[in-house]
Amino acid sequence: MKKNDIVITDIISFSSEGYGIGKIDEYVLFVPYTCTGDKVKVKIINVKKNILFCKVEEFIEKSDSHSEPSCGSYKQCGGCTLLHINYNKQLEFKKTKVEDAIRRIGKLDVKVHDVCPSDCTGYRNKTLIPVGLDKNGKITCGFFRRKSHDIIDMDNCIIQDKSADEICKAVISWMYEYDIKPYDFKTNKGIVRHIYIRKAFSSGKMMAGVVANADKLPFEKELAEKLAENPDVVSVICNVNKKATNVILGEKTNILYGEEYLEDTLLDKTFKIGSLSFYQINRNQTENLYSKAKELLKLTENDVLYDIYCGIGTIGICIGDNVKKIIGVEIIPEAVELAKENALLNGIINSEYFVGKAENMSFPDNEKPTAVVIDPPRKGCDKKMIDTLLELSPEKICYISCDPATLARDLKIFSESGKYKIGDVYPFDMFPNTEHVEAVVLLQQLSLPDGK
Ligand code: SAH
């Protein structure tokens, strides 16, 4: 088997990235945009030992789980890796992905429930849209072609909120009117890098603006006025990013009009969100996920709840409004300041939030947790964090994860400690049409009657 060979294979499973997998002798074939049940003629693009990366030449048999992709740019953009299969199949794939991780990596025999479904379109409440020139030198915005800085002009991204179209039009018309150049990655020159839009789905209000390669945006008042013509825009911002980097947002944001923060609600609690704050992308599904965490933890007024990796405090505040005390930990100082404000905004006075790496924190001796919620980034928990939790030994731990592989790795450590019983796994589809899946699990201390 070598590069450019043409072979025929059955697609028998999915990889965790959502690629179809075929097998021929000792070779494993990865074939994007296929589905289990397909028989495909493929071209080998790349060979790494016994792994073959392939491209479909022809579908010989096509599974009836395929669906007509509702976006013409999905292959070039690369964001919606699963748009070629129907939603039921997407959910089945995500459940299997979680089950595989739990069994193979976690070596655990626990029940994985069906994936909680979500709206599949218009679910993103935040978008950062690259701005550049098209082949004809026209200013355009859209998405970067996979692994490049070429912009694909995309009128309608199905997963983003429709109001983005109007904001993009306004920014581009301002750029033409005042001769503002888009940023060019090759020369690190030009001004406008991205269009920024974040929407509070509870009210329809928006924070909108640009990411610019300039400390002060030229004609910023005019941009503010133009965007503020939209009555839903309550804040116009310019984020400053002058670095030649793929990181989208810079550290500083100038407010050009209106509010410094956007407010949204989750489970009837109100949250102030800054331009740089982490905030869950899919609000409706976040409410489902937090409700599940609340149901599993069954917090009472006797509980001391630790909210670890707390961001702007959303989880603890949503699920722990009845507890004795909330203690939050988060690495980003601005997020911690907002968590403190958000707690007060929701009438929670018995809370404390700390800045720092969760794994290096020394927690107050007199306020040991009875319950913990952990919501780490994709890489999961630091081993030191798990050791600290095992030592603190709370009655219950709710683990919220955005990566089944690191979740399974961490659950294995908790399980092998002999101190915790791992409960059922509840997956949630936060990002329909992509390969990502979120999950919630309750861990119960084994010495307690309930955990037996
Ligand atoms: N629970 C929040 C945020 C979850 S995202 C919410 O649902 O909105 C994960 C958070 O962990 C981010 O806010 C990130 O800044 C923070 N973080 C990442 N590494 C960390 C570490 N080592 N210690 C503490 N916080 C960390």
Image: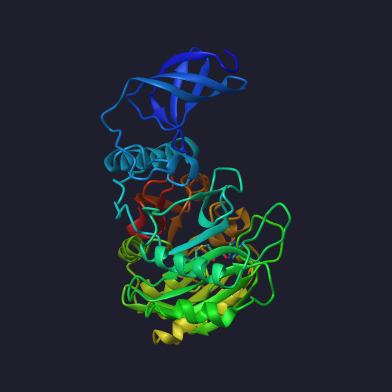
The foreground one among 131 and 68 is 131
Q: Can the viewer see residue 325 in this picture?
A: no
Residue 443 is situated, as x and y percent measured from the top left of the image, at 41, 56
Q: Can the viewer see residue 174 in this picture?
A: yes
Q: Quadrant of residue 187?
A: bottom right
In this rendering, the answer to whether 365 lies above or below 297 is below
The foreground one among 446 and 33 is 33
The N terminus - image quarter? top right
In this rendering, the answer to whether 48 lies above or below 240 is above
Ligand 1: give its quadrant: bottom right
- Give left or right: position of 188 versus 30: right
Residue 414 is situated, as x and y percent measured from the top left of the image, at 50, 51
The foreground one among 131 and 311 is 131
Residue 358 is situated, as x and y percent measured from the top left of the image, at 60, 65
- Give left or right: position of 316 versus 117: right
In this rendering, the answer to whether 250 lies above or below 8 is below
Q: Quadrant of residue 199?
A: bottom left
Residue sitting farthest toward the right:
187
Q: Quadrant of residue 292?
A: bottom left
Residue 55 is situated, as x and y percent measured from the top left of the image, at 49, 25
In this rendering, the answer to whether 284 lies above or below 274 is above
Q: How is the image coloured?
A: rainbow
Tell me which residue sits at (54%, 61%) in the image. 389
Q: How many marks?
A: 0
